């Protein structure tokens, strides 16, 4: 079976320790995590992990099963890129002197669909959000002009289909409401 | 509406002000815990102080090593079905629990381990006896949690017991900082009845059971392979009814042993690496393979690409993560087998499969002539392991709990010991933990004091937890300990002989005088090496009303057969 990118979405309780519990499942099977993002979700007090890995579908199915079985994991899914809307954000710190010899900043930002974050006397920081190839091509473009620092966030993604987490949690609440 | 993350039933209503340490004891009492195993130390001292006050209500067994505490708790849990409890101090006390926790995780044994931890103000500072036991135990626990506030104790322990025993059982570790043990709280206890992020038992899909029944009803050569799920789900009687109604030959995995009587006419023996010839061979001939509460371990399946490829696979399983993990099921049936088998039974048509069953008998005959006969009635000058087990059978008639360690003697014990009733086989299956049997036998005997408990141990494994003789001496737990001494790490030596050109690297053991050691602990003991004296030796041991140690000197270089070599298919099982 062919390896491809899968995005794993995990809804969990907000407890420390879950990150290493989930990471350990990937580690056990020698799967390198390409990126991981943890944030609050649409449900109150429920966290959402977005984990990107490059594996076969057979493997990711088993991994998601083993993640979902962890006590504090509410639900885990995996999606292909086609089933998702996803983005990454990158920050570029650039040396003003080198850059200004070649470019006019405003034009550059417009042309590359990027935003100014901050300007200091010696450097400035711009931000770009988009798909991997977009942040990557901006990186290539800036590399010759004094790119002092570069950092890219993990993928964040929402699914095209509904997730139905709230419904699941409400069901628990109503079936256990008498106790 | 406020969303709840867990639900609790009210048990006790009154609230009392107690220390965190006393709260722990009260939680144990509320959960019906009467016996715990452990070892004291600095960070757990407040809890031990309370144990002293509550000693008339909770029996604390002081093992000689924390590993012994977990194995004893496992033995207790395996024979009773209740949650076993082990406690230890922080640092080395906690890390010594790790082997037992890992063993309980892979063999689905309900365990609650409580560890003391350094004061919360010291956490992360590399304090004396500080270790990150929550981090260490994460991959080998069903759940774990660190308590730093006394007020959390009742709810966290209620969840711990609920998680350990529900669904597919497993070990839970709760780490409690010393200040949380000292601090006081308003105590009231409510048992946990549900956790929103945790579904212990998946919903039953009747349609899948109907499909399974249809496949079984149309099968010409069906084979049942059942595992510990039958025991954990308390579905032994149902399994028997299913097997008898549909007339299906049933084989057990090593952890499924005793879920059905050995002598049941449809019991065709054990599958796996050293299992019986018939069920292994015919796994690759059956047309429908019905797996019940088992997880297709690699020691059961051999080469997966050549495992039951001709068969339709039906998998009855409580843990969704086990379905399709190793073997893709054509018809997965999720749920507790106690529920799913009940429906299955209704849909099954009576059948006999006489000709198919005859094939198992024919293959058993081959195995008997080539292996079993000589093992049971050895003629060599030295004793064989199987004849010792058989002599124990003659005495117990299959009514004893047999606890085995890991290695050749384990395979022989599992192949030859007879069982009449469930929860009678205690062995380390998934992890293969040498040193398991001696402490596990103590726990088993304390869990079932009215039953005979016989520990079968090799000379290697015995020395891994030999210090528990001290616990047996102090507590007078009347278990029967049989060490089958061949002066080798026999299973490893067997592999060296078969696959490493007899290069016996570090497998020969120069052993001490075991009888003298047992005598040092004032345990009645004996040594036997001659066939003519075996019967009387076993008789004397079985008649003793106290702990008894028997060393049997057995043949040095015997091999366990049949055997499926690593990488071979189950049908390539070797008889020699």
Image (cartoon, coloured by chain):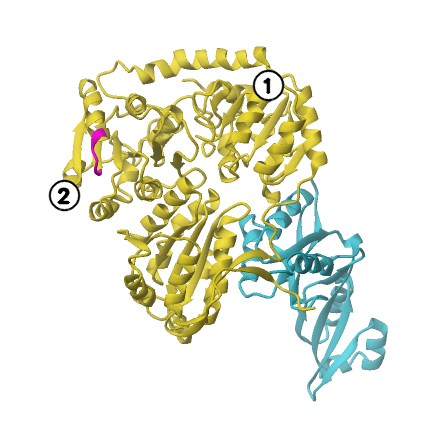
Chain colours: A cyan, B yellow
| Residue numbers of the magenta segment | B543-547
Q: Secondary structure at mark 1?
A: loop
Q: What residue sits 44% from the left and 57% below the top?
A: B173
Quadrant housing residue A15: bottom right
Q: Nearer the viewer, residue B84 or A158?
A: B84
Within 10 angstroms of label 1, few (less than 14), some, or many (20 or more) residues?
Answer: some
The answer to whether residue A60 is visible is yes
Q: Split into 4 quadrants, where in the image is the N terminus of chain B?
A: bottom right
Residue under pointer 2? B520
Horizontally, residue B290 falls left or right of residue B190, namely: right
Q: Does residue B451 belong to the magenta stretch?
A: no
Horizontally, residue B523 falls left or right of residue B40, namely: left
Q: Label 2 is found on which chain of the structure?
A: B
Which residue occupies the foreground of this view, B352 or A41?
B352
Measuring from the top left, give residue B117's x and y in whole percent: 38, 66
Can residue A6 be seen? no
Percent from the top left, x then y, of residue A145?
Answer: 73, 75
The image shows residue A163 at horizontal and vertical percentages of 75, 57
């Amino acid at each position: 079976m062919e390896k491809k990118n899968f995005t794993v979405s995990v809804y969990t309780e907000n407890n420390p320790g879950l990150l290493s519990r989930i990471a350990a499942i990937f580690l056990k099977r020698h799967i390198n995590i390409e990126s991981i993002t943890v944030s609050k979700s649409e449900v109150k007090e429920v966290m959402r992990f977005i984990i990107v890995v490059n594996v076969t579908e057979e493997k990711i199915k088993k991994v998601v099963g083993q993640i979902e079985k962890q006590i504090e994991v509410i639900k885990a899914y995996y999606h292909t890129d086609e089933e998702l809307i996803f983005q990454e954000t990158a920050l570029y710190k650039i040396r003003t002197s080198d850059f200004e010899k070649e470019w006019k900043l405003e034009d550059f930002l417009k042309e590359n669909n990027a935003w100014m974050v901050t300007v200091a006397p010696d450097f400035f920081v711009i931000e770009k959000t988009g798909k991997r190839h977009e942040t990557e091509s901006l990186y290539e473009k800036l590399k010759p002009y004094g790119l002092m620092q570069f950092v890219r966030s993990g993928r964040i993604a929402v699914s095209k289909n509904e997730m139905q987490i709230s419904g699941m949690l409400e069901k628990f609440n109503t079936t256990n409401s008498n106790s | 509406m406020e969303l709840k993350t867990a639900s609790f039933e009210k048990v006790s209503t009154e609230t009392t002000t107690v220390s965190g340490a006393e709260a722990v004891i009260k939680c144990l009492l509320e959960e019906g815990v009467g016996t715990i195993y452990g070892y004291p130390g600095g960070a757990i001292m407040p809890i031990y102080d309370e144990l002293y006050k509550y000693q008339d209500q909770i029996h604390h067994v002081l093992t000689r090593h924390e590993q012994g505490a977990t194995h004893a708790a496992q033995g207790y849990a395996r024979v009773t079905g209740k949650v076993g409890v082990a406690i230890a101090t922080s640092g080395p006390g906690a890390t010594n629990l790790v082997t037992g926790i890992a063993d309980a995780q892979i063999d689905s044994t309900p365990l609650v381990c409580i560890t003391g931890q350094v004061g919360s103000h010291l956490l992360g500072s590399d304090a004396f006896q500080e270790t990150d036991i929550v981090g260490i135990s994460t991959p080998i626990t069903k759940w774990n949690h660190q308590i730093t506030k006394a007020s959390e104790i009742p709810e966290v322990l209620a969840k711990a017991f609920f998680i350990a025993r529900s669904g597919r059982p497993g070990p839970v570790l709760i780490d409690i900082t010393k200040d949380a043990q000292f601090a006081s709280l308003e105590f009231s206890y409510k048992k946990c009845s549900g956790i929103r992020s945790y579904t212990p038992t998946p919903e039953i899909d009747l349609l899948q059971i109907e499909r399974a029944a249809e496949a079984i009803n149309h099968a010409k050569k069906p084979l049942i392979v059942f595992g510990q799920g039958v025991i954990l789900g308390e579905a032994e009687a149902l399994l028997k009814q299913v097997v008898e109604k549909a007339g299906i030959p049933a084989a057990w995995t090593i952890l499924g042993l005793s879920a059905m009587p050995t002598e049941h006419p449809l019991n065709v023996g054990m599958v796996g690496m050293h299992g019986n010839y018939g069920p292994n061979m015919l796994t690759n001939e059956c047309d429908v393979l019905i797996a019940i509460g088992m997880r297709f371990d690699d020691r059961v399946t051999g080469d997966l690409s050549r495992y039951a490829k001709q068969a339709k696979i039906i998998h009855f399983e409580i843990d969704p993560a086990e379905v399709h993990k190793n073997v893709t099921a054509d018809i997965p049936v999720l749920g507790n087998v106690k529920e799913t088998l009940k429906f299955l039974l209704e849909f099954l048509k009576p059948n006999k499969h006489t000709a198919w069953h005859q094939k198992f008998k024919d293959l058993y005959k081959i195995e008997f002539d080539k292996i079993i006969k000589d093992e049971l009635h050895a003629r060599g000058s030295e004793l064989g392991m199987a004849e010792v087990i058989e002599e124990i059978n003659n005495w117990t008639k299959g009514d004893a709990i047999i606890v085995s360690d890991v290695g050749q003697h384990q395979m022989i014990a599992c192949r030859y010991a007879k069982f009449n009733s469930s929860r009678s086989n205690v062995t380390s299956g998934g992890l293969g933990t040498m040193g398991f049997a001696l402490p596990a036998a103590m726990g088993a005997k304390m869990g079932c004091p009215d039953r005979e408990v016989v520990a079968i141990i090799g000379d290697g494994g015995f020395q891994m937890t030999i210090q528990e003789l001290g616990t047996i001496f102090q507590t007078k737990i009347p278990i029967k300990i049989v060490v089958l001494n061949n002066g080798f790490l026999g299973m490893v030596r067997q592999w060296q002989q078969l696959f490493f050109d007899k290069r016996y690297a570090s497998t020969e053991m120069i052993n001490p005088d075991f009888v003298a050691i047992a005598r040092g602990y004032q345990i009645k003991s004996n040594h036997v090496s001659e066939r003519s004296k075996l019967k009387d030796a076993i008789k004397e041991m079985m008649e003793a009303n106290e702990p008894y140690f028997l060393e049997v000197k057995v043949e040095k270089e015997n091999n366990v057969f049949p055997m499926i070599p690593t990488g071979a298919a189950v049908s390539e099982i070797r008889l020699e």
